[in-house]
Image (spheres, rainbow, N blue to C red):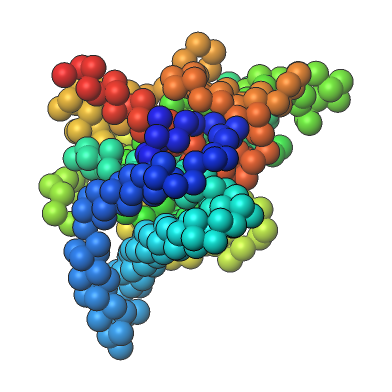
Amino acid sequence: MLPGGVPPGPARNLRGVAGPDFETKIKNLQATMHTVEQVLDLEAMRREMADLGEQVAAPDLWDDQPNAQRVTGRLSALQGELDRFTSLQDRLDDLSVLAELAKEESDADTMAEAEADLVKITKAVELLEVRTLLSGEYDAREALVIIRAGAGGVDAADFAEMLMRMYTRWAERNRYPVEVFDTSYAEEAGLKSATFAVHAPYAYGTLSVESGTHRLVRISPFDNQGRRQTSFAAVEVVPVLEQTDEIDIPDEDVRTDVYRSGGPGGQSVNTTDSAVRLTHIPTGVVVSCQNEKSQLQNKASAMVVLKAKLLAMKKAEEKAHLDDLKGDVQASWGDQMRNYVLHPYQLVKDLRTEFESGNPQAVFDGDIDAFLEAGIRWRRGADKAEV
């Protein structure tokens, strides 16, 4: 059941709930919003925004570009979070007024409008309420997402690019800044791999349920005979480190290689050896960055990714859940967590939560909130079962 006792699913029928029952539902939603407000700690959010605003106003802000990007990105993300809450609170207040007006005037049309709004607002509150379930040690962090093409040849590379677009479109929908660190293009089409950051509070806790193997079934656009093809891609999500995190990497533990950036478009990044690849010798972890023009900028960005991955490994080892954080998946048959079927029928289904959608195009366009919500609730239930 959703907040307020509204049954799940698109076929809710709220006709005839005017009066005390309708008022009860609104009060339940208001109570849920109050709980969410406490969890989000809006006052602390406003204080941080005020501090960041002062930093943005400083005339020397852009003397340190990486820090300036971090500050402005964080401020934008916090503003988006605050606007999302206050906008929903205003909608709920307006609904209460609309329902009262409909009741006083016995206006069936206005009541029908209020009932329709209740359905929409209930769903929006439910999505916001999911935030209260993100209480893990690193859930509040920003996220690094790594996508790798798996089995399936050129179709897998194309699928990897489709997934990258899916997540970046999701971020755009929520006004979350995205920073691309590395894209390795496949020869014919698509991506061999991609690494990007989503700069938003709780991005890691939200997206971490996406870690695992994703499977696509479709008629291959790269097959001259139009045969059905199954392909795979692996998604890894790790938390972005903060300055207070203790991840010390001695210089002698890291090998640095520089090379010429590659990719379509003939950008200026392709004309110099500006791309950087870092290898952490003790663990064998390799990261690369090629999306900046400067070798120093690429090295700094690559180090951010390397530290994040090492933190994920450390966290995973401490809790004995290596696969959950490191994303150690094979991206092949037998270990997929979600199927995207485009032929012979249209369906996206999460195999852990059983949640599904019959509109794959919307999913690939970034409409994945319902999948994220189901995954977070599923993980919360699994965690409780282990206790």
- Name the residue rendered at 25%, 48% in the picture: 35
- Name the residue rendered at 22%, 75% in the picture: 51
Residue situated in front as seen by the camera: 97 or 298: 97
Q: Quadrant of the N terminus?
A: top left
- Name the residue rendered at 28%, 38% in the picture: 133
Q: Quadrant of the C terminus?
A: top left
Farthest-out residue, top: 334
Residue situated in front as seen by the camera: 1 or 258: 1
- Name the residue rendered at 77%, 24% in the picture: 219
Farthest-out residue, bottom: 59
Residue 362 visible, this angle = yes
The answer to whether residue 238 is left or right of residue 171 is left
Q: Could you say where residue 351 lies in the image, as x and y percent from the top left?
A: 49, 18
Q: Could you say where residue 372 lies in the image, as x and y percent from the top left?
A: 44, 36
The answer to whether residue 28 is left or right of residue 249 is right
Q: Does residue 122 lie above or below 201 as drawn?
A: above
Q: Could you say where residue 156 lies in the image, as x and y percent from the top left?
A: 62, 29
Residue situated in front as seen by the camera: 59 or 166: 166
Q: In terms of image quadrants, where is residue 216?
A: top right
Q: Could you say where residue 17 lies in the image, as x and y percent from the top left?
A: 49, 41
Image mark count: 0
Farthest-out residue, right: 225
Q: Does residue 346 lie above or below 133 as drawn?
A: above
Q: In terms of image quadrants, where is residue 218?
A: top right
Residue 149 visible, this angle = no
Residue situated in front as seen by the camera: 113 or 327: 113
The answer to whether residue 99 is left or right of residue 286 is right
